[in-house]
Image: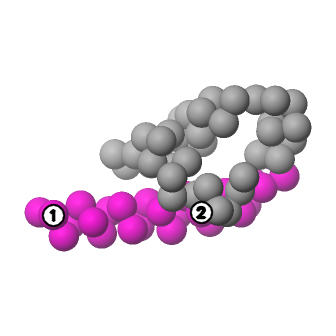
Amino acid sequence: MVATHDRLQETTELYCCVVFQSYRYMFERLRDMNMPETLVYWRLLQVHRFPQTTPEFLMEKCQGYMF
C-alpha cells in the first residue's frame, strides 16, 4: 500500500510540474498581482482535480518549477 501511495505522489508531482510549465504565464501574472500562492494552488487543484493532493503538497513539490 505504501508503494502505491509513493507512486501516486510521484505521478502527481510529475503531472503538477508539467501543468505548471503549461500555465507558467498565468501563474507569473497572478504572482505579479500579489495573489497569495495558496490561492493559486487551490485554483490549480480545482481545475485539474489532483488525486489526494493539497496546496501544501504542490507548493513543496513544485516550488522550484514556478516561484
Left or right relative to 38: residue 23: right
Position of 14 relative to 43 (above/below):
below
Residue 1 horizontal/vertical position (percent): 11, 63
Query: Badges 2 and 1: C-beta atoms under 8 Å apart?
Result: no
Q: Which amino acid type corresponds to the residue marked 2 in the rendered image?
A: Cys
Residue 38 belongs to the span the image colors magenta: no
Q: Which amino acid type corresponds to the residue marked 1 in the rendered image?
A: Val
Residue 18 horizontal/vertical position (percent): 62, 65
Res 32 quadrant in image: top right
Please give the range of residues in magenta. 1-26
Residue 47 horizontal/vertical position (percent): 58, 40
Residue at image mark 2: 17
Residue plotted at (59% across, 63% down): 17
- Label 2 and label 1: CA atoms lie apart by 23 Å
| Main secondary-structure element of the magenta-colored stretch | helix
Position of 34 relative to 65 (above/below):
above
Residue at image mark 1: 2
Residue 9 belongs to the span the image colors magenta: yes
Position of 8 relative to 67 (above/below):
below
Would you say residue 47 is visible in this rendering?
no
Residue plotted at (51% across, 68% down): 14
